[in-house]
Image (spheres, helix red, strand yellow):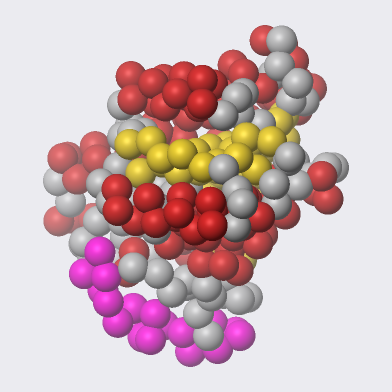
Amino acid sequence: MAGVAIVTGGSRGIGAAVCRLAAEAGYDVCVNYQNDRDAALQAVEDIEAKGGKAIVYPCDVSKESDVQSMFREVDNELGTVTALVNNAGVVLPISRVDEMTSERLAKILGINITGSFLCAREAILRMSTKHGGKGGVIVNMSSAAARLGSPNEFVDYAATKGAIDTFTLGLSKEVGPEGIRVNAIRPGLIDTEIHASAGAADRVEKFKDGVPMRRSGSAEEVAQATVWLMSEEASYVTGALLDVAGGR
């Protein structure tokens, strides 16, 4: 067995693809979700059909008590976490900055940034040799938006992903001596339902010709890179920001 993995936002899109591929790689998986329980249960069913082990856990990652409860459940049901994928994130409807409300900003900052910090904290308390752990790996889900800025669309989302890049760099140096590798994936134009949830269902078709590879990416392609970073094949990789963006 490869270990125990927690994948936040694991019910759909990239998160679900990571859950399935991590299970194939030998991980017991906690499929975290906030709203779509049916999709989370489907991911577990798919994993178990191939002989893997998985559980679901509902959790709003922006809430400290929820995160703590999730990690305790994983301790009890699967064992000590060895891999955390901070995938949970939200994109809100397209907006210019001069149209954004404080409520919108609080929501996106809470889920995309605070949630990643809280989950990382709980993972470190279990993984770090400083705390009696045996090491582990954290993969943060950033975005090519961190370097593109997403003007006239999602500057707030892009800013949260810029924060995730900085978080990844700093944390990798902080816990590297304690047996924990920390890296980030920066997906580009990926064909998932996240675009429709932001009110831009045609976004992939609209922008794909601006990608040097002239196509969108798939959730599975992002998952493959993520699970590679979780693996021993990436044992000397930490503090990396890995673009999976078709050259965009």
Asked where in the image residue 57 lies, by quadrant, the reply is top left
Q: Is residue 142 visible?
A: no
Residue with the most extreme top position: 131
- Where residue 111 sits, quadrant-wise, is top left
| Residue plotted at (61% across, 85% down) | 213
Total marks shown come to 0
| Residue visible at 67% across and 10% down in the picture | 131
Q: Is residue 206 magenta?
A: yes
Residue ID at (45%, 54%): 45
Q: Position of residue 80 (x, y in %)?
A: 62, 23
Residue 160 appears left or right of 239? left
- In the image, residue 116 sits, relative to residue 209, either above or below, namely above
At horizontal 70% and vertical 52% (from top left) the residue drawn is: 25
- Image coordinates of residue 94 in percent, x first then y, are 23, 65
Q: Quadrant of the N terminus?
A: top right
Query: Quadrant of the image for the C terminus?
Result: bottom right
Left or right? Give the position of 60 relative to 220. Answer: left
Image spot of residue 144 (x, y percent): 52, 62
**Residue 47 showing in the rendered view:** yes
Residue placed most toward the observer, 52 or 156: 52
The part of the chain drawn in magenta is: 196-214
Q: Is residue 133 left or right of residue 104?
A: right
From the viewer's side, name the closer residue of 206 and 224.
224
